[in-house]
Image (cartoon, rainbow, N blue to C red):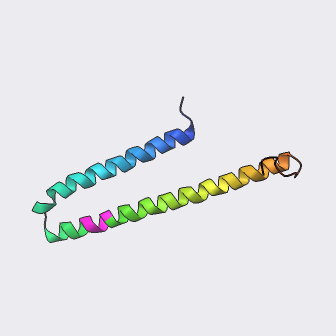
Amino acid sequence: MKDAKQRWSDEMKESTDALKTIRDELKVQMHLASMDARTRFAAMERRLDNEQLNIHKTLSELLAGFRALKDELAKAARGGRPSKHA
């Protein structure tokens, strides 16, 4: 059974893959599109790129926060003593 983290990761990958597939299909059709459609497509593509960067940054920050909390809890469990691995 997959844990919640793996399910969420799988769902994010599926969503990202779906967006990329639609984007690629639209690129093929762009030669027939009007200038307005091209402009709208370019704006959405920039937004997709920006959101992917934001998601990566947020996940990195969350990971750092969880690791710090894990370390603090481990330290507290040892009675505030430093880790043997530190």
Residue 72 part of the magenta-drawn span = no
Left or right side of 72 for 41: left
Closer-to-camera residue (61/32)? 61
Q: Is residue 78 above or below residue 46?
A: above
Residue 44 part of the magenta-drawn span = yes
Quadrant location of residue 3?
Answer: top right
Closer-to-camera residue (63/39)? 63
Quadrant location of residue 51?
Answer: bottom left
Give the x, y percent position of residue 57.
52, 61
- Farthest-out residue, left: 32
Give the x, y percent position of residue 14.
39, 44
Q: Is residue 14 above or below residue 86?
A: above
- What residue appears at the point 21 percent right and 52 percent down from the top-left corner? 25
The N terminus lies in quadrant: top right
- What residue appears at the point 31 percent right and 52 percent down from the top-left corner? 20
- What residue appears at the point 61 percent right and 53 percent down from the top-left corner? 63
The span picked out in magenta is 41-45
Give the x, y percent position of residue 78.
86, 46
- What residue appears at the point 50 percent right and 43 percent down from the top-left corner? 8
Q: Main secondary structure of the magenta part?
A: helix
Q: How many marks?
A: 0
Left or right side of 51 for 42: left
